[in-house]
Image (tube, helix red, strand yellow):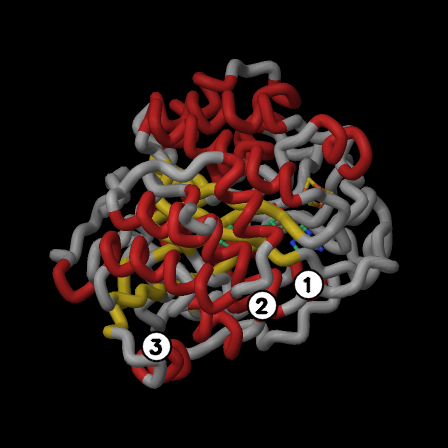
Amino acid sequence: MQDRFSEIREKVLSQQRLEFEDGLFLFESHDIAKIGQLADIVRKRLNGNHAYYVYNQHINYTNICISHCRFCAYAKNPGDAGAYAWTAADIRQRILSRIDEPITELHIVGGLNPELPFGYYTELLETAREVRPGATLKAFTAVELDFIAKNTGLSLEEVIARLKQSGLAMLPGGGAEIMSRRIHDSLFPLKIDGKRWIEVMETAHGAGLMTNATMLYGHIETHAERLSHLMALRDLQDRTSGFCAFIPLAFHSARTGLSHIPPTTAFDDLKTIAIARLMLDNIPHIKAYWVMIGEKLAQLALSFGADDLDGTIIEERISHEAGATSPKGLTRDQLTHLITSAGYDPVERDAFYHPVSEIAPSPDFAEGTCR
Ligand code: V47
Ligand code: SF4
């Protein structure tokens, strides 16, 4: 009789879909080299020897949030020391402060701030579009879109349509956490659950927006809950093909309500990336997000299923508030050095994975599809 690894290897080689039980077996295994080799087969099939990165800027427009997720060290209550909501003028200033850099993506997310009217979000996008024409505005998670709709009394469809008119071109993948009733009720009961996160993403995909998807791991979730999360993403991708990239987010516990939880291990980080690559056979890209796991492990992850290091970023706040020790940004030279010294071909991409070297400069904020 064949051992389980050989069975799974045959499935991978013949491009058969892995099942929940296969994923569970891999999570429970400690044979990291074999898991990595399997993931590398899929990585090479989908992305060859390319390793992508993006020249981007993060803008966290407000840290005021009424959701009180237990894993979050970033959010503040209105009136707390350090609570902020940037005006359009502040955002203009932030973008202008880096206007000489060849930024192609603005990643714009914030807390659930009940004091911001709908016009705030459209003005934010329109300001970004005016100051940085040609860059993709990747903004507002499914959680924020659902909140904006409820807070302003507009339908989700209306919110998406109007934000698109103001320049919204893509959604980031945050806020998915772990899609499980148990985890939702314990860690983020005031925020939308997994079912609603999927509905919002499906609506966005239906409106022509590509999105990313994330999973926050390394807190109180089980391996089975991680797999159910991955399979829910795979199911939606079968229906819409709207996901561009999957980003596993390693939990950082400092200054959160879960500060007793130790950091994730290198083994778990690599295994999670590799198993995501194997289970998510229909999502083109897997990011090793260096902010969460450090540059050195992110580099190694390129041989464990990941094909993208995300970006230059510069001012990451969410994980650094929670104790992340990685730098707050990397230069293009640092990113390409990590990639070439691991034997991969660096490709600077835009938000939709088009190589920047092949993109004709365009004054428009077009939606796009990933490749
Ligand atoms: O939604 C919150 C998570 C997310 C912590 O789409 C934490 O391209 C770790 O979604 N420790 C924001 N994680 C980051 C995010 C993201 C990052 C990079 C690229 C993209 C993309 C998306 O960070 C939140 C939440 O799930 N988070 N607190 C914490 N203590
Ligand atoms: Fe608010 Fe997001 Fe932090 Fe939750 S993770 S408290 S929604 S900022």
In the picture, measured across the screen, residue 208 lies left or right of residue 125, that is: left
Tell which of 170 and 240 is nearer to you.
240
Would you say residue 127 is visible in this rendering?
no
For label 3, the crowd category at 10 Å Cα-Cα, with few meaning under 14, some 14 to 19 and many 20 or more, is many
Residue type, numbered disc 2: Ile
Task: Name the residue rendered at 23%, 47% in the picture.
Answer: 371
- Give the number of the disc on residue 293: 2
The kind of secondary structure element at disc 2 is helix
The answer to which image quadrant residue 366 occupies is top left
Q: Are marks 2 and 1 in contact (CB under 8 Å)?
A: yes
Residue type, numbered disc 1: Thr
- As measured in the structure, the alpha-carbon distance from the residue carrying label 3 to the one carrying label 1 is 23 Å
For label 2, the crowd category at 10 Å Cα-Cα, with few meaning under 14, some 14 to 19 and many 20 or more, is many
- Give the number of the disc on residue 264: 1
* Mark closer to the chain start, 3 or 1: 1
Give the image location of residue 129, x and y in percent: 36, 47
Q: Which residue is mark 3?
A: 339
Say if 158 sits above or below 297 in the image. Answer: above
Would you say residue 39 is visible in this rendering?
yes
